[in-house]
Amino acid sequence: MDISEETLPAMKPKVEARLSAVQALFQIDQGGGSVERVLGQFAEHRLSETADAELFEKLVRGTIGSTALLDQKIAPALTAKWKLERIDATLRAILRCGVFEMIDATETPAPVLLEAYVDIAAAFFDDKDVAFVNAVLDRLTRDIRPGSLVG
């Protein structure tokens, strides 16, 4: 689950922090090490100097620390066909991180966050999975921040 090195320099600090956070969450979920170990690996080898390192760490620590709560929020937004424990680990990381930030970063407009995580999904998946992420995060955003999305 990597993005090419050519893509990273063109990314904005928060965009890169979110993308890297999703990658770190994926790594942790797949047994790739403790939070501290993965944060250290990213700081030393994978997180560029242009990334918002503070946001990256906040997203990783916050998402991991809130996983049970996040999963309780996400599960009802899924259909019977899409159980959280059965969906792709990258999709799970995107949903968890997106919901965490939607709850935690109230200063960031909901449409900005929704678009950010849909864009991350588009970096890894085809249109069907991107539409799935969009639908789930849209539904959850309307519950978490009522009235924040138009339409």
Image (cartoon, rainbow, N blue to C red):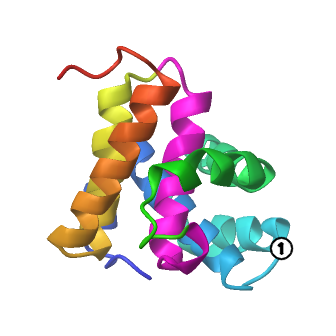
- Looking at the rendering, in which quadrant would you find the C terminus? top left
Res 123 → quadrant: bottom left
> Please, what is the three-letter code of the amino acid marked with disc 1?
Ser
Tell me the residue at 80%/66% (across/down): 35
* Magenta stretch holds residue 39: no
- Name the side, left or right, on which 134 lies relative to 35: left
In the displayed structure, does residue 105 sit left or right of residue 138? right
| Label 1 SS | loop
Image quarter in which the N terminus is found: bottom left
Nearest the camera: 145 or 80? 80
Above or below residue 110? Residue 40 is below
Which residue is label 1 attached to?
34
Q: Is residue 93 magenta?
A: yes
* Whether residue 116 is situated above or below residue 144 in the rendered picture: below
Q: Give the residue at x 46% y 21%.
A: 145
Percent x, y of residue 41: 70, 75
